[in-house]
Image (cartoon, helix red, strand yellow):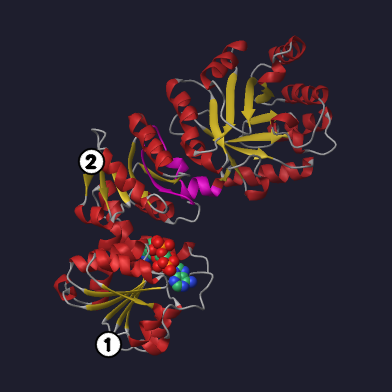
Amino acid sequence: MTRLTVPISANSPEQALQQIKAAKKAGAEMLELRTDYIEGLNADLVKNLVASVKGSKGKTTPVIVTCRDKRQGGAIDYPLKLRMEVLIAALKAGADFIDFEYDNFLTTENQEKIRLALSQSSMARLILSAHDFEKKFADITRLFRSISTICPGTIPKLVYAANHINDCFDALDLLHRTSGERIVFCMGEDGLISRILAKKFGGFVTFASIDEQSATAPGQLNIEQLKQLYRYDDIEPGTELFGVIAEPVGHSLSPAIHNACFTEMKMNRLYLPLLVRGYKREFDSFLNNVLLRKWLNFRGFSVTIPHKRNALNYAGTNQGFIEPLAGKIGAVNTLILRSDGKVKAYNTDYSAALDAIISGMKIKKAGLKDLPVAVVGAGGVARAIVAGLSDAGAKIRIYNRTVEKAQKLAAEFNCESASLDELENIDAKLLVNCTSIGMHPNIEATPVSEEYLNKNMAVFDTVYNPAETLLLKNAKSKRAKRIDGVTMFVNQAMAQFKLFTGTDGNPTLMRKTITEAMVY
Ligand code: NAP
């Protein structure tokens, strides 16, 4: 059983008691008293603090007492002698676990003192920890073996900084290969999945802070994120995994959307943010790592900037299935992992946009044939929408700031091209904004002046933050039909959800989740 453990990083005993109350209220299953944060530290102070926590009324929460060496991430640089006195006092006061650095335990003198104190405590256990704040361990298996065997009953704790998501596989492999009580995870933004997945693979604890201010290590999530966003209470060994591959990934709304639907539908599935830094090589390596480890139980991915083309190339070399139009668009935003190790690649962006247009204009797909369309922008989204509309037979003119890019895209899909200045002569029944103009925080900007809009036009803005952009506000005042970017976003997430699970998600819940998470 994995215990959700909250570090108490207070600088006074009074503040520690307040943090403990907040941690228990938030759902902490174990507490870690980081005594190295307390100013004016002494053994009596820790003894009283532990005694008051363990002696409190009601069900007591297990407590780990740590007084971390500054060289291994400690807050205040207390001498080793004092740190050992503190741990021994904590044991006498009833602490359930003490956490001591493996390096410091190697000296005979320290080892004897700790062993003696443990032998005088009936229940308490020793956690021996090793940290690397810069990189992964050279040989994590050997280190794990050394720590596990040095003292019977010890819980080994191995924590290192991941500099890339691919560094997490050492920690996950170790958890997979071993059993029993052990703590193994990676620090930093790149190590995030190892913290969340510790529960799936039976890690002894996973750490979460009460809030951002009280976090004690890089990349530590807070309890609310872990429980609400990442479905902590529902994670178990059989949980199927999904995620969004991107760089950056922190802003992505996809984990919130998909996890909200998994929770509502009581599905044993979890959707993760997957920060894959780098280019094709790093992307390929991440997918190879996942495919080599079927036990991870990854089933599918959303893919976004900058990896959409990498995903297409990967599916090509993996001899998987590629949806024909995705090949023509040159980008894939969804990968499904088959049980035979092949991947299926799709692009749900163009169909999401086409569905939004058809329902917003109240027409059938056949109504797109010969429809005059103005597409503003010539980037990735424009490319998907132009491919979809041109496949449906629309007559498209692409307007872009960099005219050469518009010309290139137009040549590929047999369309016309123009500069942004030519928007004043716009003559289209559908206008689609595929630029980022009008997106938060630049909400006072619009790609097309109000005077060029008219009531016979449908206006589709792919920007979804905010949902009602200035372009759409202006279209409203001209009484034009309006289609917002949230509709497209929900459509593409719905299509992905169907590919992932074989069932429909809840579009209303998706829309609500997106609008609640929006920053404007
Ligand atoms: P992209 O590949 O970087 O293309 C950006 C486009 O915007 C280019 O055509 C660029 O013109 C143009 N542009 C950017 N800033 C400009 C400015 N200040 N003035 C004039 N043109 C400007 O990005 P993308 O992936 O296509 O995404 C574009 C937008 O689509 C995003 O910002 C997002 O709001 C929206 N989007 C919506 C959804 C959805 O589901 N609703 C999904 C993804 C994206 P140049 O070629 O001249 O640089």
In percent of width and height, residue 267 lies at 33, 45
The residue that label 2 is drawn on is 320
Which residue is pictured at 80% across the width and 23% down the height?
A: 80
| Label drawn at residue 456 | 1
CA neighbours of label 2 inside 10 A, class few (<14), some (14 to 19), many (20+): some
Q: Is residue 235 magenta?
A: yes
Which residue is pictured at 36% across the width and 82% down the height?
A: 423
Label 1: which secondary element: loop
Label 2: which secondary element: loop
Side (left or right) of 81 relative to 117: right
Which residue is pictured at 47% across the width and 50% down the height?
A: 247
Q: Quadrant of ligand 1?
A: bottom left
* Among numbered discs 1 and 2, the one appearing first in the sequence: 2
Outermost left residue: 366
The amino acid type, in three-letter code, at marker 2 is Gly
In percent of width and height, residue 232 lies at 47, 42
Magenta-highlighted residues: 224-248
Q: Is 22 drawn above or below residue 515 in the view shown?
A: above
Q: Is residue 374 magenta?
A: no
Q: Nearer the viewer, residue 468 or 221?
A: 468
